[in-house]
Image (cartoon, rainbow, N blue to C red):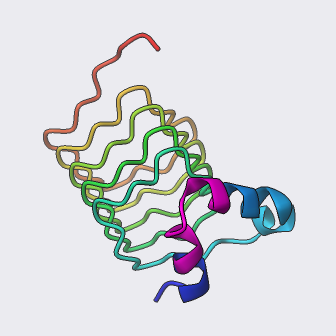
Amino acid sequence: MANQKELDLLSTGKTLWNTWRREYAEIHALELDLHEADLHSADLQGFDLLNADLTGANLQGADLRNADLRKANLSDANLVKAHLRWADLRGATLCRSNLKGAIPIGANFDGAHLSSIEIDGADFTEVPR
């Protein structure tokens, strides 16, 4: 289960979360423990989730636009209808994740591990930024 302290801090909003991440830069070297977290429909737009462990997390319908998900582990995550527009997923692991109906327009998947993902109905339309 996810670390409750980190979940509580996440729920305080982007400003406090990202400030905490900047002030404690050594946290970037650690993997944030958010595995199996229920974050469905959460507003995580612009959140710093670098190195986050989101394995098995429920992110269905979550707003992850412009989120920093570099090197995050999203294996087995539910990203059905998640908004991933302009999300930074470089080096992320999305093995066995469900992206059905997701909106990853403009998301950066460079170096991401995408084996066995489900993408039926996902909108990968290229649009200018």
- Out of 95 and 72, give the one closest to the viewer: 72
State the image coordinates of residue 16 (x, y, percent, origin top left): 66, 61
Q: Residue at x 58, y 42 (%)?
A: 90
Residue 99 to residue 20: above or below: above
Image quadrant where residue 72 sits: bottom right
Q: Where residue 109 appears, x then y in whole percent?
A: 49, 37
Outermost left residue:
121
Above or below for 26 versus 104: below
Query: Residue 35: percent from the left, percent from the top?
Result: 47, 77
Q: Is residue 75 above or below residue 5?
A: above
On the rendered structure, is 55 left or right of 121? right
Q: Is residue 115 left or right of residue 79?
A: right
Q: Nearer the viewer, residue 3 or 19?
A: 19
Is residue 15 one of those drawn in magenta? yes
**Which residue does the image show at 80% across and 56% down from the upper left?**
22
Whether residue 75 appears in this view of the structure is yes
Q: Is residue 76 magenta?
A: no
The span shown in magenta is 8-17
Identify the image quadrant of residue 79. Answer: bottom left
Relative placement, left or right, of 113 versus 58 is right
Determine the residue positioned at 59% across, 73% down: 9
- Residue 50 visible at all: no
Choose top left, top right, bottom left or bottom right for residue 111. top right
**How far across and how far down the image is residue 43, in percent?**
40, 54
108 relative position to 36: left or right: right
Q: Residue at x 74, y 64 (%)?
A: 20
Q: Main secondary structure of the magenta part?
A: helix
State the count of labels. 0
Foreground of the two, 58 or 21: 21
Vertical arrangement, residue 16 with respect to residue 104, above or below: below
Q: Residue furthest top?
A: 128
